[in-house]
Image (spheres, rainbow, N blue to C red):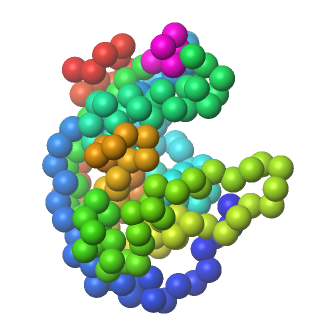
């Protein structure tokens, strides 16, 4: 994945878009055995690979706003990895999240301000490893410019593809401020959410 080209129009739109506060629980379910079982919540911050809301190299944390959405994400990625989602061992993380500056892409008016449609958010983004990488999607470009400080956001709340009416949250590690907090309910994964 390449870095998005400079986009002054998007950067200006992000600076003009209001941030909204997000307070609530957030969830993550992961397939795996001993390796995942021994992870701590802090390990979830290690991700910097390409994601729906970011190109490679951007430090971020992906969570879901609802347990059912996290389970839908788990089931999709377990099946994609060749596992039977009904038989795959899952490990769950939950956290209390308080973020002062979130870009709410669940809101149609906000999507119009930053020039993205719901279908663009929900579109496939994963590239074929046998082909040259495609240019970043609009959502990846938005996440990239947020990670660089445009708009002064710390996270994006966006509609989930894997569950109707579900919402996912991507938090940019380098953009957290003094009034933001992500407090895990358990340091290690559990077999069911608290």
Q: Is residue 38 visible?
A: no
Please name the residue shown 27% across and 69% down the image.
108
Residue 190 in magenta stretch = no
x, y percent for residue 61: 42, 46
- Dominant SS in magenta: loop
Residue in the foreground of this view, choosing between 122 and 169: 122
Residue 69 on image: x %, y %: 34, 36
* Residue 134 on image: x %, y %: 71, 64
The residue sitting at the right extreme is 130
Q: Is residue 39 left or right of residue 171?
A: right
Q: Residue at x 46, y 51 (%)?
A: 60
Residue 34: quarter of image? top right
The residue segment tinted magenta is 85-90
User: For the image shown, how many numbered marks are present on the structure?
Assistant: 0
Classify residue 24 by image quadrant: top left
Q: Which picture quadrant has residue 121?
A: bottom left
Q: Residue at x 28, y 59 (%)?
A: 106
Counting from the top left corner in percent of width and height, residue 160 is at: 38, 47
In the displayed structure image, the side of residue 104 where residue 130 appears, left or right: right
Residue 86 shown in magenta: yes
Looking at the rendering, in which quadrant would you find the N terminus?
bottom right
Q: Quadrant of the C terminus?
A: top left
Residue 119: tell me if it is visible: yes
Observer-nearest residue: 66 or 48? 66
């Amino acid at each position: 994945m390449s870095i998005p080209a400079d986009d002054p129009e998007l950067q200006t739109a992000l600076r003009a878009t209001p941030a909204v506060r997000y307070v609530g629980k957030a969830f993550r379910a992961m397939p795996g055995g001993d390796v995942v079982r021994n992870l701590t919540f802090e390990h979830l911050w290690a991700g910097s690979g390409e994601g729906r809301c970011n190109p490679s190299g951007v430090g971020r944390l992906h969570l879901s706003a609802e347990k059912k959405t996290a389970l839908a994400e788990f089931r999709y990625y377990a099946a994609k990895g060749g596992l039977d989602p009904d038989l795959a061992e899952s490990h769950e993380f939950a956290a209390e999240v308080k973020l002062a500056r979130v870009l709410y892409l669940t809101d149609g008016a906000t999507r119009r301000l930053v020039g993205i449609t719901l279908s663009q958010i929900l579109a496939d983004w994963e590239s074929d490893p046998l082909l040259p990488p495609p240019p970043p999607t609009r959502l990846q470009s938005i996440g990239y410019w947020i990670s660089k400080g445009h708009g002064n956001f710390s996270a994006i709340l966006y509609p989930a593809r894997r569950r109707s009416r579900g919402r996912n949250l991507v938090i940019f590690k380098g953009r957290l401020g003094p009034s933001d907090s992500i407090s895990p309910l358990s340091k290690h994964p559990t077999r069911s959410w608290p």
